[in-house]
Image (spheres, rainbow, N blue to C red):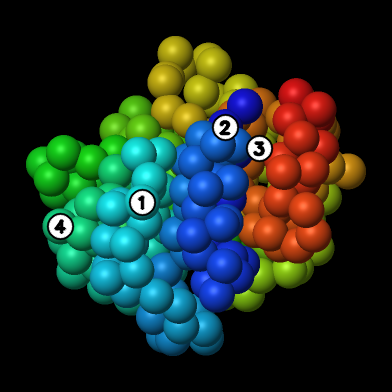
Amino acid sequence: MIISPSVYSMHYENFKEEIAILNKNADWIHFDVMDGHFVPNITFGPMILKAFRRSSDLLLDVHLMVDDPEYYANSFGKAGADAITFHYEVFNNLDDCLKLIDKIHAMYMKAGISIKPGTPVETIFPLLHKVDICLLMSVEPGFGGQSFMEESLDRAKAISEYKKNNDLNFILEIDGGVNDLNAHRILQSGVQALVAGSFIFEGNMENNFARLRKCE
């Protein structure tokens, strides 16, 4: 199990203390990048990621919820990102997605594809042989603190089955409403990486990590 806390929910006034806890307990650090167009919210730019790069050796896992993922992939790559995931829905075109995947790989980063809850999982099957990460959204992207969509379990199982049947090696990641009450069922569906924001950062972070680890 990979735990990738979303720093969208981090308390930045306590950055020094919380990054120390992340470095001790997390596997990856997840960055939800929003531009106010693809989704209605706006988060942070590459300068924030640079601060994390100086403070952590963990894999920096960037999730682009933006209209121009090629521009942002380049900017965040220069800032120190290790993995860039973008949304299929930006292009709605397999060829354009494949071109960007190749460009991300050419920048020596892992490449990922993500889909919203309403996009059929079969849509991205032709891309899965090229990616390192498949990020399944289990809430509508754009806001933290939403409840997990239970139908995401069947969607994860379908992707996991396709992965197994085709001998693929990407990491199946899920983002949205993950907590210690649903993590075990999520992992049973074939998911390997859990993005958790509100659950990790609200309350005692060390205890929250431990509660999530017990679900493995």
**Secondary element type, mark 1:** helix
Q: Amino acid at mark 1?
A: Ser
Query: Of circles 4 and 3, which is in front?
Result: 4
- Across and down, in percent, residue 84 comes to 32, 51
What residue is disc 4 on? 78
Question: Mark 4 near mark 3, Cβ–Cβ under 8 Å?
Answer: no
Mark 3 closeness class: few <14, some 14–19, many ≥20 residues within 10 Å: many
Question: Mark 3 near mark 1, Cβ–Cβ under 8 Å?
Answer: no
Residue at 34% x, 28% y: name it: 129
Query: Which callout, 4 or 1, points at the residue further toward the start of the chain?
Result: 1
Query: Of circles 3 and 2, which is in front?
Result: 2
Q: Is residue 136 above or below residue 139?
A: above
Q: Identify the residue at the far front of this view.
A: 17
How much space separates mark 4 and mark 2, taking CA atoms? 25 Å
Query: Which callout, 4 or 2, points at the residue further toward the start of the chain?
Result: 2
Location of residue 189 (image quadrant): top right
Q: Amino acid at mark 3?
A: Ala
- Say which of 145 and 191 sits in front: 145
Residue at 20% x, 47% y: name it: 104
Q: Is residue 198 above or below residue 99?
A: below
Q: Is residue 118 visible?
A: no
Any mark on residue 156, and which? 3
Any mark on residue 55, and which? 1
How much space separates mark 4 and mark 3, taking CA atoms? 32 Å
What residue is disc 2 on? 2
How much space separates mark 2 and mark 1, taking CA atoms? 20 Å
